[in-house]
Image (tube, rainbow, N blue to C red):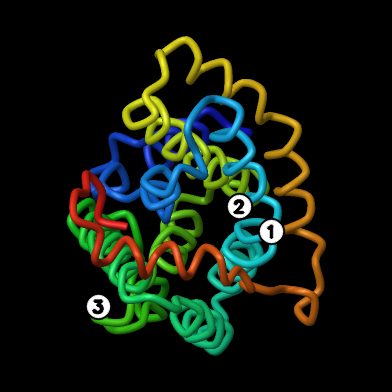
Amino acid sequence: MHAAALLHLLQFASPALPIGAYSYSQGLEAALESGAVHNAETGRAWIVRQLSEVVSQWEAPVCWRLMHAFGRRDAAAVAEWSERFLASRDTAEFRAETLQMGYSLSRLIAELGIADAAITAMLPPETELALPVAYACAVAALDIPREEALLAMLFAWAENQVLVCVKSVPLGQVAGQRMLLSLRPELEAAALHARTVADEDMSNWAPGLSLLSMRHEVQYSRLYRS
């Protein structure tokens, strides 16, 4: 991996990227409220299960397909997977989350001027722009290797989940870093699965997570937006 591509990847996968990722827990805050997550062990179990049953089964494979579609300038494939991903957001919070961050990342791409007209022309309207679409666009525009970009996307997701545990369980900073370090095998396995799973085997079936998300929409006290 060339130094330029690595530096671009570190920038665009960073939690410091100003798209608001830190403000979402993706259902984890509701799990904390219910008591399903209450310590380091249950926090890690939550992350691993969501990674293996949801993220590696749907979010990551969709992002992988979008990166390939942008790479070969296939506007029809970008539109198809964009529509499928947006349709898969089955609660108001999850839909609002991906649209807000997708819009923010697309505006950042435009303001930085990193994508040419051929790439940006494939983006959906801003009101329908999901985060994986904008991320795949940035990966193509900056010529970042796709395998590394996928792994970085998964790591950023896991890091955000761990930070929710650190702040809300709460856990110590060292405990959080220990948890994140321990997730390496699961993250590698998730990336491999996302690259190899067939279209017909992909699924976002997670009714428990959807119910927690809906409960979070009316949760009395919240730190996070999902």
Q: Nearer the viewer, residue 71 or 178?
A: 178
Quarter location, residue 66: bottom right
Q: Are marks 2 and 1 in contact (CB under 8 Å)?
A: yes
Residue 58: image location, x then y, percent: 63, 67
Q: Amino acid at mark 1?
A: Glu
The picture places residue 68, in percent across and down from the top left corner, at 63, 67
Residue 53 is marked as: 1
Label 2 secondary element? helix
Looking at the image, residue 3 sits to the left or right of residue 135; the answer is right
The residue indicated by pointer 3 is 126
Sequence-wise, which precedes: disc 2 or disc 3? 2
> In the image, what residue occupies the spot 44% across and 68% down?
133
Q: Position of residue 38 (x, y in %)?
A: 47, 33
Pair 3/1: label in front: 1
- Which numbered disc covers residue 50? 2
Question: In whole angstroms, how far apart are the C-alphas of marks 2 and 1?
Answer: 5 Å
